[in-house]
Image: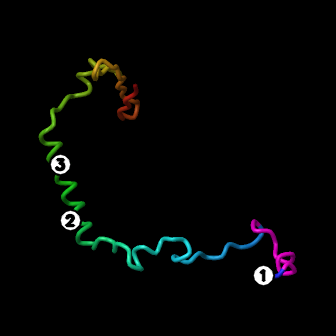
Amino acid sequence: MSEDDRRQRPPAQDREQEPVRDSEAGCGAGREGGMAPASPSADARASAEAQAAALQLLDTAPRHEVRELTAGGTEAVIMLDGKSYLLRITRQGKLILTK
């Protein structure tokens, strides 16, 4: 580009941004010799396995009623390795755990 061309062009912030090609941005890995994305059926299968594992954990993990932990109130102190954490029930019925 000649010096005259540079003078006539507006500053970068005033110019419309030109679209960037995948090869310029360095994000063409999935298209040109990089790793291909997983097939939709593989993604669905992995998602189903993760959901099944989460449900199994819900079935086997110990259960504690929060209202019992708070003795009918809205706060309880929970200890882990000598550190105290505050468990609070909000007005909307959600739980907040803070250190």
Provide the secondary structure element on which disc 3 rests: helix
| Image position of 63 (left or right of 87) | left
Number of the label disc, if any, that sits on residue 1: 1
x, y percent for residue 52: 17, 54
Q: Which residue bears the numbered disc 2?
A: 45
Q: Which residue bears the numbered disc 3?
A: 55
* Residue type beneath disc 3: Leu
User: Which segment did they paint magenta?
Assistant: 3-13
92 or 84, nearer to the observer: 84
Q: Residue furthest left?
A: 60
| Residue 5 placement: quadrant | bottom right
16 or 36, nearer to the observer: 36
Residue lying at 20% horizontally and 60% vertically, measured from the top left: 48
Residue lying at 75% horizontally and 65% vertically, measured from the top left: 13
| Residue 78 placement: quadrant | top left
Residue lying at 38% horizontally and 31% vertically, measured from the top left: 96
Give yes or no for contact between labels 3 and 1 (Cβ–Cβ under 8 Å).
no
x, y percent for residue 86: 36, 23
Number of marks in picture: 3
Provide the secondary structure element on which disc 1 rests: loop
x, y percent for residue 45: 20, 65
* Residue type beneath disc 1: Met
